[in-house]
Image (cartoon, rainbow, N blue to C red):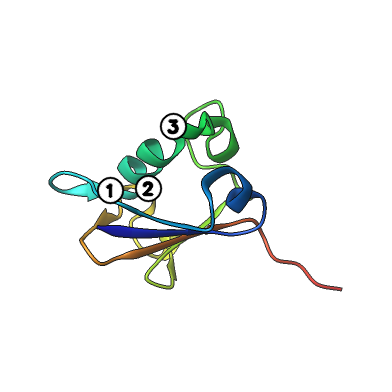
Amino acid sequence: MIKVKAFARFREAFGKEQDIELDGTATVMDLLTELCAPHDAHDMIFDESGMIKKYVNILVNGRHIQSLSGIKTELAGGDEVAIFPPVAGG
């Protein structure tokens, strides 16, 4: 099981937290596709080219996917994925 935590506007679409089970070797892309499908939320996460929108931040076990392998980052049981918009202060 992979634990998914959603924050801010993503929490409204996906709920605060959920566990998702994926078969075999799964990637961040597989997880996001599975997560978005029942909520009809594909456009919330992905742009027209199928890439993650620039303002969507995704962390796997506390590390931004840009510092890993991006949407091809492999996931394993027990991983925690956080999805949130940019954080700004003033």
- Along the horizontal axis of the image, is 64 left or right of 44? left
- Specify the label residue 27 is tagged with: 1
- Location of mark 2 (residue): 71
Give the quarter of the figure containing the C terminus.
Answer: bottom right
**Mark 1 or mark 2: which comes first in sequence?**
1
Which residue is located at x 34 percent, y 49 percent?
28
> Residue 82: horizontal and vertical position, in percent?
47, 62
Q: Which mark is nearer the camera, 3 or 1?
A: 3
Q: Is residue 72 above or below residue 36?
A: below
- Along the horizontal axis of the image, is 33 left or right of 87? left
Amino acid under disc 3:
Pro
- Along the horizontal axis of the image, is 88 left or right of 25? right
For mark 1, does the 10 Å Cα neighbourhood hold few (<14), some (14 to 19), or many (20 or more) residues? some
Amino acid under disc 1:
Thr
Give the quarter of the figure containing the N terminus.
Answer: bottom left
As helix, strand or loop, the secondary structure at mark 3 comes to: helix
Name the quadrant containing residue 74: bottom left
**Mark 3 or mark 1: which comes first in sequence?**
1
**Mark 2 or mark 3: which comes first in sequence?**
3
For mark 3, does the 10 Å Cα neighbourhood hold few (<14), some (14 to 19), or many (20 or more) residues? few
As helix, strand or loop, the secondary structure at mark 2 comes to: helix
Amino acid under disc 2:
Ile
> Residue 20: horizontal and vertical position, in percent?
31, 50
Q: Alpha-carbon distance for marks 1 and 2?
A: 7 Å
- Specify the label residue 35 is tagged with: none
